Image: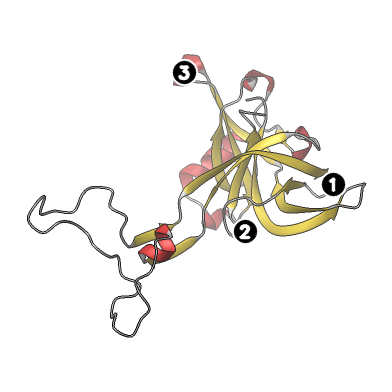
Amino acid sequence: MNKAIIGKKLGMSQIFAQDGKVIPVTVVLAGPCPVVQKKTVEKDGYAALQVAFEDVKESRITKPVIGQFKKAGVAPKKYLREIRLENCDSYEIGQEIKCDVFAAGDHVDVVGTSKGHGFSGTIKRWNTHRGPMAHGSGYHRGVGSLSANSDPSRVFKNKKMPGQYGVERVTIQNLEVAKVDAERNLLLIKGGIPGAKGSLVVVKQSIKG
């Protein structure tokens, strides 16, 4: 992977192609992301860049993190993430990664946290069928039969049951960058990406593109 950036999902919109077709896009505020620390194979066992995103007051972050920013000569940021690039040596501490590392037509993978749905039943969580809706049935949206009575007398592992739904790390692969607005630090990516509006996402070069 040669390029990646941290961003914030702003929402969805649409643009028009040259032939007049409507293209649905997700607008991502991508960067600028200053490099705060460089991980090296000699010292850390692997090569990576620690990058930051989104300005924040010093009172909102801890003192050790503030010291890390001061050491790098970077203003305090809200988010810190590591990205592993093949060309880490070409970056210097304090250097900013901007959205113009990508270009229209590039294929990217987007990593985000899916929307939370709380404690959900099996119909919403697993798309199971509901029970009979006739007057004689008193069981409509329940989980249904769980296990046999005498053998095995237990519920099998991985049985699809009600529970916490959402708030999971989700990666959508091989999306296309429709447009890059370097002046406003915006990436317009075709289609939808995981997460709610305002959530943090990582946009990186596609491993399949």
Give the residue number, with chain letter if any, for mark 1.
183
The residue indicated by pointer 3 is: 43
Q: Which residue is mark 2?
A: 198
Which residue type does callout 3 highlight?
Lys
Residue 44, placed above or below residue 81: above
Q: Nearer the viewer, residue 160 or 104?
A: 160
Q: Image quadrant for the N terminus?
A: top right
Residue 73 shows in this picture: no
**Which marked residue is nearer to the observer: mark 3 or mark 1?**
1
Q: Earlier in the sequence, mark 2 or mark 1?
A: 1
Give the spatial CA distance, label 3 vs label 2: 35 Å
Nearest to N terminus: mark 3 or mark 2: 3
3 or 2: mark nearer the eye: 2
Q: Amino acid at mark 1?
A: Glu
Residue 100 is tagged as none
At 79% from the left and 57% from the top, the residue drawn is 14
Give whichever of discs 3 and 1 has the lower sequence position.
Answer: 3
Can you name the residue that lies furthest to the left here? 150
Is there any visible trace of residue 108 in the rendered image? Answer: yes
Name the residue rendered at 13%, 53% in the picture: 154
Q: Looking at this view, is 193 or 72 the one in front?
A: 193
